[in-house]
Amino acid sequence: MADPITQYLNILQPRAFLWKEMLLEKQHKKDFSKHDGIVFGSVVNGACKLRLPDGETLCVKPGDFVMLNAPGHWSMEVDDTDASQSYRLFGVCQQSHLGILRQKTCLVLAGHFDFIFADVGLQTLLLPRVSHFTENQMARTRLRLILDLIVEEASADLAGGEWVKCRLLELMLTHVLRLQSNFSRTLSSGALCAMADPRIGPCLKLLHNDFGKPWTVQSLAALAGMSRSVFAKNFRRLVGIPPVEYLTYWRMTLAKRDLVHTDRTLQQIACSVGYQSTTSFGTAFKSVVGKTPAAYRSLMKRWSSPDIPGGGESGS
């Protein structure tokens, strides 16, 4: 049985881009515009403050890792409020080959993920808005090892380096998702939060792997060993939306993929995602996507056409 994280990543198809090093000087603020993908960074030296779109300020110290999901306008600046901050490199990167580091500077290794099949709604279901892991939380984890290897690759000019960095970044994203599950108690909602729950998690996997079955709240609650009302309340609290709505959204996500990437008929796609007629499928699809299946397929085919300047796929 495939797990939801694997299925999410297979559909979204993340593409990693590394910005390499960003050196921030004291009293220098770097602004970033809205991004629909995922932005990530790890502080190699010094400390910084991230000012997020909702006004929240996140203090990031040496060795910390941060990931922002579809952030709006945000900024970074040096945090020199703590005189005890150690200005050092972590892990395997002990030499100053990333540049001459001065006091009251901050060096960040950062990058972003875009998605071939972009779907901000799916990202929101999967990931929290902000993920922040401290150096202590990552100690003795595979994520720590992967981040150290990324720093090493970004600091050297080795044969095949770009290919290696891309693969390491893909591994990094997967291990961030795994670590999020381990710290699920700190998450307010989302699929990662639900997957770690001993009762809701198995039901979520069933919805992902047997999505064609006519699931009801009652049947899922029975499998979870809970009353209908308690199951519905807990599912919504953990995932963020009700069980049947989640199932519909997952079905439409799979349908969108097939409409874009296959030549299957609407009837075939409808049956594959659990609908007995194209009419009921079309109604559900339009309620989620805002377009009929035929209109969505036509739009995506035209958008991905090489004849259209800047054309590319999008699942939104």
Image: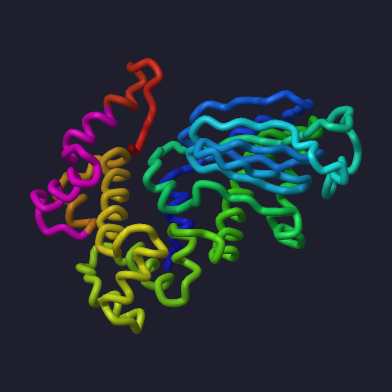
Q: Which residue is painted at 91% across and 38% down in the image?
A: 95
Q: Quarter of the image containing the N terminus?
A: bottom left
Magenta stretch: residue 293 in it? yes
Q: Which segment did they paint magenta?
A: 274-301
Front residue of this view, candidates 117 and 32: 32
Residue 171, can we see it? Answer: no
Residue 180: x and y, percent?
57, 59
Magenta stretch: residue 154 in it? no
Residue 289: x and y, percent?
24, 42
Q: Quarter of the image containing the C terminus?
A: top left
Residue 208: x and y, percent?
35, 62
Side (left or right) of 161 relative to 16:
right
Front residue of this view, candidates 192 and 159: 192
Residue 97: x and y, percent?
88, 32
Which image quadrant is residue 308 in? top left
Q: Main secondary structure of the magenta part?
A: helix
Residue 305 vertical placement versus 46 (above, below): above
Q: Which residue is painted at 88% across and 30% down in the image?
A: 102
Front residue of this view, candidates 143 and 31: 31
